[in-house]
Image: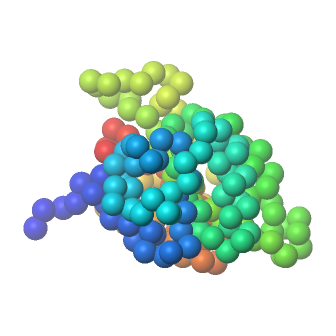
């Protein structure tokens, strides 16, 4: 039996999330590029196409979560998660505490670290991995998916966390796709 590739594992894991009709995939370029092909075959009704505006994407996801939806935000380059830090650090991570438990938004964030290897090196501002820094800023899990074997379990954990009202950042590596 042949082991799954990284991309096959990502595709399988995202399709498992999509099996819940409340799941919404949020991001830019999703309608056409389908998140590096990992959302291929997922119903268009579950995909919300946004402008290139990471803070807006997270704000939208938080709002949808508060309305009972299960948002999954796709950030194609982890470098640009910096644009969403206000929403992530000050709202998503703290809403439960500052609302005295009244609100517990839960979002799955897929953040992709760009190509570091050849033949396509996407440059210094497209290949940064902020996993360690994020772990110091937020209380919810930041899971690095370093191999295909990590993917399905990490997604399962993220889905369970979301059911429990806890967000998760899944760090994916484009070199492995």
Q: In this view, does 84 lie to the left or right of 30?
A: right
Residue at image location 70% in from the left, 45% down from the top: 56
Image: 90 above or below 159: above
Q: Where is residue 151 in the image (x, y as percent from the top left)?
A: 38, 60
Residue at the outermost front position: 45
Taking depth in this image into account, of 149 and 53 the one nearest to the observer is 53
Q: In which quarter of the image is residue 162?
A: bottom right
Q: Where is residue 140 in the image (x, y as percent from the top left)?
A: 66, 62
**150 above or below 175?**
below
Is residue 138 in view? Answer: no
Snapshot quadrant of residue 131:
top right
Q: In this view, does 23 lie above or below 52?
A: below
Q: Quick check: 167 left or right of 41? A: right
Q: Which residue is drawn at 45% across and 59% down?
A: 44
Q: Which residue sits at x=48%, y=41%?
A: 29
Is 47 left or right of 115, judged from the image as shown? right
Q: Where is residue 124 in the image (x, y as percent from the top left)?
A: 50, 22
Quadrant assignment for the C terminus:
top left
Where 4 sits versus 34, above or below?
A: below
Residue drawn at the location 39% of the way across and 56% of the way down: 39
Compare residues 78 and 37 and report the one nearer the observer.
37
Identify the image quadrant of the N terminus. bottom left
Outermost residue on the left side: it is: 1
């Amino acid at each position: 039996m042949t082991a799954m590739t990284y991309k096959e594992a990502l595709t399988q894991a995202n399709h498992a999330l999509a099996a819940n009709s409340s799941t919404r995939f949020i991001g830019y370029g999703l309608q056409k590029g389908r998140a590096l092909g990992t959302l291929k075959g997922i119903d268009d009704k579950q995909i919300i196409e946004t402008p290139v505006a990471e803070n807006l994407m997270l704000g939208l996801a938080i709002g949808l979560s508060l309305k009972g939806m299960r948002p999954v935000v796709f950030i194609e380059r982890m470098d640009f998660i910096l644009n969403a830090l206000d929403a992530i650090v000050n709202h998503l991570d703290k809403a439960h505490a500052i609302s005295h438990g009244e609100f517990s938004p839960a979002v799955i964030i897929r953040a992709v670290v760009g190509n570091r290897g050849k033949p396509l090196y996407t440059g210094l501002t497209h290949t940064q991995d902020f996993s360690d820094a994020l772990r110091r800023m937020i209380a919810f899990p930041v899971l690095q998916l370093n191999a295909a074997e990590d993917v399905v379990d990490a997604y399962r954990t993220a889905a369970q966390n979301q059911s429990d009202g806890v967000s998760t950042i899944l760090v994916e590596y484009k070199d492995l796709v």
